[in-house]
Amino acid sequence: MSLLLRYRKLGIEARLRVDAPELEPLALGLQSSAVTGRESCEETATAELVWQRRSGETWQIRLKGELWREAALSQEELFLQSDSLLDDLIREQLALVPMLHAGGVVHPSGGAVVICGSSGAGKTSLVTECILQGWNWLSDERLCFRQENPFQAEGFRRNFNLKERSFGNFPEIASLPSTRELIRPHTGKRVRFFDPEELGRGRFQAEGTVRAVVVPRFDASGNGTVVTPLGGVELVNLLVPELRTTEIHTARWIAEFSRQVSAFSLRYSNPRGLADVLGSLLESGDLLSRP
Amino acid sequence: MIDEAWSKSRPTITDRFFWEPLPDGCLLFEEATGELITLNGPAELILSHCDGEHSIGDLRRMVEAELEVSPSVTEELIRRLLSAGVIANEAVE
């Protein structure tokens, strides 16, 4: 018998079938926050993603029935690659929808903040800090804007991955039951995957109305937190590289978004305490600069 | 003579780009290529007056008067708009 896991994001289902029983513990930790069902199944059951033994202790992925890459995979590679492939399966169903590489949080009193930036900017750290301070979450990585209302961000369920640089800022993550620490094969860097539900049950929010955009930038020099307003052109230039595609619908959306939503750059050295800064931005929309 | 011809020429906006205003500039999108270009305030002011009526000399004077931008910067912006295909200047091409 095999194991079938069902994932649902943005109303779209993707399935993973695990044909090797020894991989089941690993599979149960994969994007556990997005799992909507798990069941035993035959090896013939339909699934977009399938994990199989290659030979000995090596493994392979079948993606939509085809062997995905010729090279045999370790368990770490299986997990890391499948984490991305699951998201890709959802994204390909929404090819013409603006999807932003960004995190998102919702203040307990309402009002969402989009946290946009390239890899390493601090999206996961800021979202994690906000959850720990009682905020709800939309995503640490991806937001969708497909509704009639261009300011309505839709959340994207997935497990977070915290980079090694941030381990010390969030020691509580190490002891969560879901936490799985892996080393990325190509970079040699450690990451911790964890289920954000374990920081606060029921805090995932399917959508939120965006009131502000924050573009974080980690500053190792430790000179406090500095918030600076961003202009419309600056915001567009920062958002465009984080969009998957640009077509006319996306261009219209990004322009409307940049005209209406307050945007700030946020230079910080420690993510702890930044939930208060984001809360202040929502309340005042004013420039804040903290020594 | 070339400079004078250039200065008197009257550029026009091409129809390659879809145009959306921003609070401090504008966004241009070329559907055929997916290229997205942002323009700052001075560039947007130039673009909005590339109507075949205003000469490059007019544009230099207008941008200097309204935004205190030097004529050399305006020249450079016009050349960039031409190079990107946002405007055309048939008189000197």
Image (cartoon, rainbow, N blue to C red):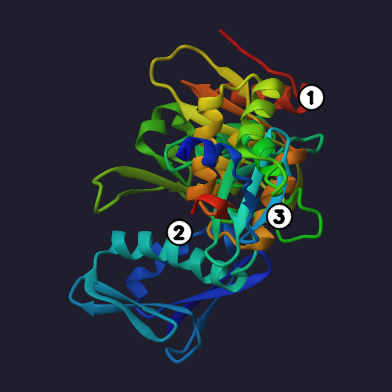
Of the pair B92 and B42, the residue shown nearer to us: B92
Please determine if labels 2 and 1 lie on a single subunit.
yes
> Which residue matches tag 3?
A252
Describe residue A63's horizontal placement relative to residue A257 as left or right: left
Q: Residue type at mark 2?
A: Gly
Q: What is the tally of numbered marks visible in this picture?
A: 3
Q: Residue type at mark 3?
A: Arg
Q: Tell me if I can see residue A46 in this picture.
A: yes
First in residue order: circle 2 vs circle 3: 2
- Residue extending farthest top: A291
- Residue extending farthest front: B1
Considering the numbered disc 3 on the image, is that residue within a helix, a strand or a loop? helix
> Which residue matches tag 2?
A29
Describe residue B52's horizontal placement relative to residue A80 as left or right: right
Q: Residue under mark 2: which chain is it in?
A: A
Instruction: Give the spatial CA distance, label 2 vs label 3.
Output: 39 Å
